[in-house]
Image: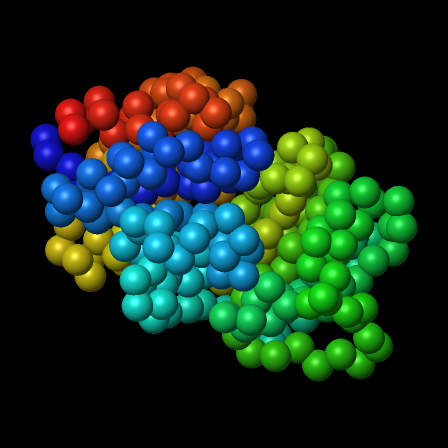
Amino acid sequence: MSLKMVVTDLDGTLLRDDKTIDPRELDTFHNLGRKGIIRVAATGRNLFSISKVIPTDFPFDYVVFSTGSGIMDFRTREILLSNGLTKEQAKKVARLFISENLDFTVHFPIPENHCFQYFQVNPENIGFNAYREYYHEFCSPLTPGFDFSDNTCQLLTIMESDITRFNRIKSQLGGFKVIRTTSPIDHSMMWMEVFPENVSKGHAIEWLCQKLYIDKQHVLAIGNDFNDIDVLDLVGHARLVENGHPELKDRYQIVPSNNSNGVSAAIEYFIKF
C-alpha cells in the first residue's frame, strides 16, 4: 500500500538527543517531497519551542503543535486549527491541582501559548524549576484573583513519576483530554497535560487527513512516548523508535533509535529512494 503522508514526533524521535537532526533524515524528507508525500511533524512543543530546533526551511508541509492543540501550514505559517479551554474549564482544573498540592502552569491562547502563569508550592520541584527557567522571559506567578481567559491552551503539572497518583487525578478530569508525557528535560519526571476533550495528535492528524482527502490507512507515523499513542493507533502504519518508552514496546513495531536514523529507517521500509 502506497504512503500518502508521513507523521513524525520530534523530541526523542526525529531529533537526536542533542536536539539536532541527522543529515540523512533531512535528505529523507526532501525525497518524500519529491514524491508528493505529505510531511508532518506532530509534537508537544509549542510554536516558539519548535522554532528553537526546526529551521523555517525544513521540508515539512504541516506542523501539529502543542500535542494537537493547533495545526500550522509550515510553508505559509498560517494557523489552520486551534483549540482552547473555556474560562470555567481552566478554573476547574486549577482548583483540582491546587487541592492536590501540585505545581502547575496556565498557558495563554494560541499562538502565544509559550507564555504562561504558574502556581508553585513545591520549591524543590526540579523539573518544574527547569521548565520555568527555560521560559523565564515568558512566565510570571499566578496572582490572587487571576482572571482566566477563554481559549486557555492548556494546564500542565510536572510531578514525580507516580502512575497511581496520575491515574487518580486523571479520574477526576472527565470531559478533558489528559495526556501523560515523559519529561523531555530530565526523561524521568511525569508531565500531566490537560486540554479540551477533542485535542490530541490523533485528532489533529485525522482533521488534516480529511482536509487533504487522505485515507489514514495510507499514513505512516513514528513516535516514542505516551502522547504519540493517539496518532500511532489512528494510522495504517505505526512505528516506535527503539529508545521509546518501555511500556509501549509491545504495542508497535520497533525501528532504530532517534540517534540512529529511526525515522528514515521506518520510511525506507515502504519507499526506496
Nearest to the observer: residue 21 or residue 193: 21
Give coordinates of residue 266: x percent, y percent: 29, 26
Quadrant (top left/top right/bottom left/bottom right) for the C terminus = top left
Tell whether 128 sits left or right of 261.
right
Whether 156 is drawn above or below 256: the answer is below
* Residue sitting at the far left: 1
Whether 117 is drawn above or below 190: the answer is below
Residue shown at 74% from the left, 61% from the top? 136
Tell whether 75 sits left or right of 52.
left
Give coordinates of residue 64: x percent, y percent: 39, 55
Nearest to the observer: residue 267 or residue 245: 267
Using the rendered view, name the quadrant where residue 265 is placed.
top left
Residue shown at 61% from the left, 39% from the top? 184
Q: Is residue 195 visible?
A: no
Q: Is residue 24 visible?
A: yes
Tell whether 36 sits left or right of 105.
left
Whether 106 is drawn above or below 171: the answer is below
Whether 248 is drawn above or below 217: the answer is above
Using the rendered view, name the quadrant where residue 222 is placed.
top left
Give coordinates of residue 250: x percent, y percent: 43, 18
Give coordinates of residue 98: x percent, y percent: 79, 59
Quadrant (top left/top right/bottom left/bottom right) for the N terminus = top left
Nearest to the observer: residue 61 or residue 200: 61
Residue shown at 40% from the left, 19% from the top? 256
